[in-house]
Image (spheres, rainbow, N blue to C red):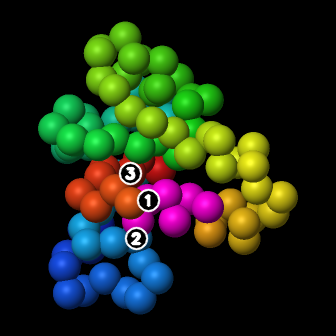
Amino acid sequence: MCQRVVRPGKARPGGIGESMKIIGIGIGARENLSLGAWEQIQSAEQLVLQTGSIPLADWLREQGIRFETLDAFYEQAEDFEELLALALAHLRQMPGATLCL
């Protein structure tokens, strides 16, 4: 599991926000999730997946875990820079969220 927490006062200007957990989910298969990543996902108040087009998303739904994805921003954006701008603007509105990448 790769996790980084940005704490209040340490966030960079234009960064994600007050605090956000970032969890590495590898290739997006439940078999590859570490126990620590699974525990963080289960305890997340607001869970965001980079995409819902991975096997992990289907499995999380089966487990009754609610989440949102950044898929709409991929569809809206004309290039990678716009994608990042849209996703960051959205994530800034979600302090304390857990983002799975």
**Residue type, label 2:** Ile
Cα separation between marks 1 and 2: 6 Å
Residue 41, compared with residue 85, is above or below; it is: above
Residue contact between numbered discs 1 and 3, judged by CB atoms under 8 Å: yes
Residue contact between numbered discs 1 and 2, judged by CB atoms under 8 Å: yes
Q: Quadrant of residue 25?
A: top left
The magenta region covers: 86-92
- Could one spot residue 57 in this view of the protein? yes
> How many numbered marks appear?
3
Residue, disc 1:
91
Residue 59 position within the rendered picture, expressed as x and y whole percent measured from the top left: 41, 17
Disc 2 crowd rating (10 Å Cα; few below 14, some 14-19, many 20+) is: many
As drawn, the label of residue 16 is 2
Cα separation between marks 1 and 3: 9 Å
Whether residue 43 sits left or right of residue 82 in the image: it is: left
Whether residue 95 sits left or right of residue 76 in the image: it is: left
Q: Residue at x 62, y 68 (%)?
A: 85
Disc 1 crowd rating (10 Å Cα; few below 14, some 14-19, many 20+) is: many
Q: Earlier in the sequence, mark 2 or mark 3?
A: 2
Residue 41, compared with residue 89, is above or below; it is: above
Residue contact between numbered discs 2 and 3, judged by CB atoms under 8 Å: yes
Element type where label 3 sits in the image: strand
